[in-house]
Amino acid sequence: MPITNLTKEEFIKVLNLKTDFLAESVKELIHTKSNNSDHTVLIVDDEINNLQLLKRTLRGKYKILTASNGLEGLEVLKENLDSVSLIVSDHKMPIMEGTKFLEEANSIAPDVIKILLTGFSDIEIITDAVNKCNLFQYVLKPFNPEELSEVIKNGIDKFDLASSKSSILKDLKELFYKTIKSIASALDAKDEYTHGHSMRVTLYSIILAKYINVPENQLEMIEISGLLHDIGKIAIPQAILCKAGKLSDEEFVIMKTHPSNSEKLISSIKKLENIAPGIKHHHERWDGRGYPDKLQGENIPFSARIIAIADTYDAMTSTRSYRKALSHEIAIQEIQKCAGAQFDPVLASKFVEIEQTIKAAKEHPEEYYTKYSSLYKEIK
Ligand SMILES: [Fe+2]
């Protein structure tokens, strides 16, 4: 059954199924990532005998790269940034000491595990090196190959854990983002005249929010709110939603239930609770004559005040079943005229200030969406 024909209860079930799917995907990802044993170790040592011994110790377990001094080591690291998981470096070397090399290597590749080989007399430099080079461990010379091999294995395990964690987080965000976007698109598809509406409202909202320097964590919240602001329309009968012509008073009463429906749906998902108030109040007016709660001025949640402007602009500039689209210029004049009555006057004047960007975004929504979206950037 298409998602747009579901009842509220069925829709919540679908969302819960999607949550289960996310949990399963995470398990699968952990399994896949932790099975990856394809690692490269960079060994930097000026003593040829040591280098040979290290190579013999690690042969067959990892791919090995070697360098005979720090400068060469940095070159090899830069050329193999995507593949090196761990570096073993001697300390006493000509041209550049091991600690200096590892410090530089740390600025290039902070996630790569670093191990220092050092003589007992160098012990004072260790404390400093631990901090400066983000040192995983030091090994005293002469080293026991088996012990060193164990230290390297532990280092590789740590590298795997850290990289699978960040990769899982990225994949999880991608799943979340795609789920939210697919729900928004399914909703827009319910009515041919609102095609792309949620995405465009989100786009205008985040452009305005960025322009007024809203902090990054709130930008993400505004983006999700924009995508889901009309989700409650899922429960509005198609005959009302797509009616060609003016709604009757009774029909309008039903239509006006959609912000509260949106809030109820969103509140049922733990992770989205905090965006629910912004969604519920996107049809409130600055002068208190909106719905559902007739909130006034700054009592209206900030994200709802932003979405209200973006929503109205998109409604005016899109063709509807009962009228043709208004021009961008007329829509901007309307926003200006309604500042302080329908809209937050400060936000409305900021929106007018960036009207050229809004116009360009309206003409190239996909391009501008990838440029402005915080969620999209995180999963790139
Ligand atoms: Fe709405």
Image (cartoon, rainbow, N blue to C red):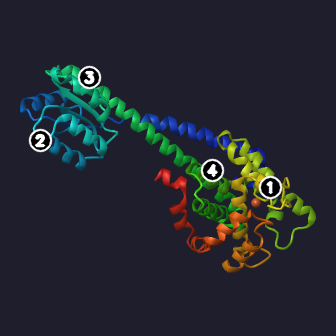
**How far apart are the alpha carbons under marks 2 and 3?**
30 Å
Q: Quadrant of residue 121?
A: top left
**How far apart are the alpha carbons under marks 2 and 4?**
52 Å
Front-lying residue, 367 or 335: 335
Front-lying residue, 85 or 38: 85
Residue at 71 percent across and 75 percent down: it is 331
Secondary structure, mark 3, is helix
First in residue order: circle 2 vs circle 1: 2
Q: In the rendered structure, find residue 95 and report the number of the disc placed on it.
A: 2
Residue at 29 percent across and 31 percent down: it is 135
Front-lying residue, 151 or 302: 302
Q: Are marks 4 and 1 in contact (CB under 8 Å)?
A: no
**Residue 32 coordinates in the image, percent (x, y):** 42, 37
The type of residue carrying mark 4 is: Met
Q: Nearer the viewer, mark 2 or mark 1?
A: 2
First in residue order: circle 2 vs circle 3: 2
Q: In the rendered structure, find residue 150 and report the number of the disc placed on it.
A: 3
**Residue 18 coordinates in the image, percent (x, y):** 62, 43
Q: Which of marks 3 and 4 is in front?
A: 4
**How far apart are the alpha carbons under marks 3 and 1?**
61 Å
The type of residue carrying mark 3 is: Glu
Q: In the rendered structure, find residue 258 and report the number of the disc placed on it.
A: 1
